[in-house]
Image (cartoon, rainbow, N blue to C red):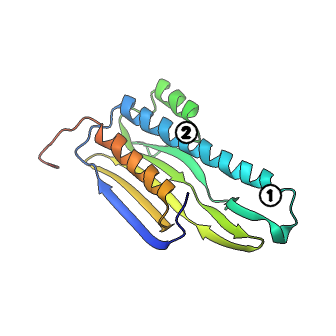
Amino acid sequence: MYDNKVSVINNEYDYSNILPTIEMVSYLVNYCESIYKQFLKLKEDDEEKNKQFKPEFKNYMYKNAYKDCFEVRIVEKTYNNITCKDFETFKTAIKDGNVKNVDKLLISLDLSYKRGIGNDLTDYDNSFDIIFKPYEIKFARKSNHNEENMNSIENSINEILKKFPIANSIFCTK
């Protein structure tokens, strides 16, 4: 199910030669939101399972860490920021023309939680950030444990980014 290996994972990928079309970015945003919803459900189920026990006997697999989030931040050229907390809000931003000629777009997915028994909980930090800027498109993952589920999410995001159209230019050739 999971691997408890403490590890420093700080992976960064450069996708500066991809073309971030509205369709492909929307697909990526939708994927990230679906992963976030699954994560929230895991935490909810874990909390429900542990309700019946006294605090010292609770065994958490996905205890709330209060820093998890999913958001898409659109920074317009006027430096106006629009933050979308779900795919529907992002679709509205597209419909309203807010995803045209942007300065940058950032997708943040934080799947951090605590695991352990009673009050002896270990922090599991997992953040996935995708930054779209002109001529600079990066995907970064930071984690403090090597977990198969988080590795799978990282691989899936990479696979989605690899499906974006590619255009080699004088600024980036891969």
Q: Is 143 situated above or below 107?
A: below
Residue placed at 42% from the left, 52% from the top?
A: 154
Q: Is residue 110 left or right of residue 128?
A: right
Say which mark, if any, is on residue 157: none
The kind of residue tagged 1 is Asn
Q: Is 157 situated above or below 50?
A: above
Q: Is residue 148 left or right of residue 39?
A: left
- Between 44 and 167, the residue placed more toward the observer is 44
| Residue 83 in view here | no
Q: Secondary structure at mark 2?
A: helix
Q: Residues within 10 Å of mark 2 (few under 14, many from 20)?
A: some
Q: Is 72 situated above or below 95?
A: below
Residue placed at 45% from the left, 63% from the top?
A: 142
Q: Which residue is mark 1?
A: 50
**Residue 22 horizontal/vertical position (percent):** 38, 30
| Residue 145 in view here | yes
Q: Which mark sits nearer the N-terminus, 1 or 2?
A: 2
Q: Is residue 46 left or right of residue 8?
A: right
The kind of residue tagged 2 is Ser
Q: Which residue is mark 2?
A: 34
- In the image, farthest residue toward the front: 1
Q: Secondary structure at mark 1?
A: helix
The Cα atoms of the two marked residues, 1 and 2, are separated by: 25 Å
Q: Residues within 10 Å of mark 1 (few under 14, many from 20)?
A: some
